Image: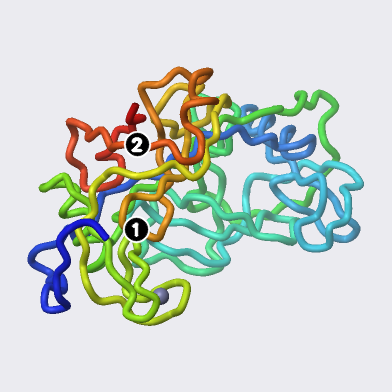
Amino acid sequence: MKGETMTTTDAPTASDEMESLAAQLRMPYTLTPGWATGIFLAELGRHRLIGSRHGDTISVPAQDFSGTSGEPTEGLVEVAPVGALQGFTTTADGTLGLVLIDGTDIPMIHRLLDFDSETLQIGARVEAVWSDKPVGSMLDLAGFALASSSESFSPRAVPGDLLPPVLQVDYSMTLDYQHAYGPYYGTLFNAVKYDRRLRGVTCTKCARVLLPPRAMCDVCFAPTSQWVDIDAVGTVQASSIVHIEFIGQRMKPPYVYSEIVLDGTSTRLIHMIGDVDAEDAKTAATPGARVRAVWSDRRTGSLTDIDYFKLIP
Ligand SMILES: [Zn+2]
């Protein structure tokens, strides 16, 4: 086993480890709403609420299939854009309400606008507030505000000039979060960030060296103990050449993705092999090939601090 071995008294403490990493999950996608919801979205721009009939129930927004019974719709109806508040919750970004539109059976969730949450009451009559600039999305209905009258309405037949359905809505969901490292990952990524070295930990029973380090061995479930410094040099076990582009890639395809066993470790690290032509990689990045990490100029305290592994001739 290579590297300096330390005793258990060198267990990590909170003061010398990275505690977390700011991370982001981004998922742009396109929503295909289907026929009924597509018409519902299109008609919002004309300040109309379109629902769907499924047996004895009416759903708004209109659905191709009932969300409760699964029944296909028997047809569309127009409902008045007024209803009663069934519930609400206040968040840092505003108040959300469950609104039961007159004549429908399933409440819809949407923003409540211009409300004083102190005086808000279940059962309050509300009416739609429309966006000034419709774009073919749910937010063409900006939300609901207190109704100016208490009059209630029944659903009626849809008008004859319904717009064609919106076929596709572009969405992007972004989640910002903190990845809490804990003491083991924290110690590894502290060493990666500041010292440009890797650290693993040894199982007390089977003596495997685990990278990333963890509290328990995932083969024999015994606790781990000794920390081991690991050189960022290893041997390729398997490789794939990636040709498909997808979101989140750090290299432009084609590139080589490999399982690498670093010297002295018992685990496989998944990383990229760079600085090699994809065609040449078919014969060069094969099992047994030796590779060395190329460290990045950026210091983030994650495995992306290694730009890629480079083949050792
Ligand atoms: Zn073990």
In 3D space, how far apart are the residues under numbered discs 2 and 1 (Cα atoms)? 14 Å
Question: Residue at the left extreme?
Answer: 15
| Secondary structure state at the residue bearing disc 1 | loop
Q: Is residue 231 above or below residue 4?
A: above
Q: Nearer the viewer, residue 188 or 2?
A: 2
Residue at (41%, 21%) from the top-left corner? 276
Residue type highlighted by circle 2: Val
Frontmost residue, 147 versus 172: 172
Judge left or right: residue 157 versus residue 138: right
- Rendering quadrant holding ligand 1: bottom left
What is the three-letter code of the residue carrying label 1?
A: Thr
- Residue 311 falls in which quadrant of the image? top left
Q: Within 10 Å of the Cα at label 1, are there few (<14), some (14-19), or many (20+) other Cα atoms?
A: many
Residue ID for mark 1: 265
Taking the spot 29% from the left edge, 43% from the top edge, the residue there is 233
Residue 18's x, y, as percent? 17, 58
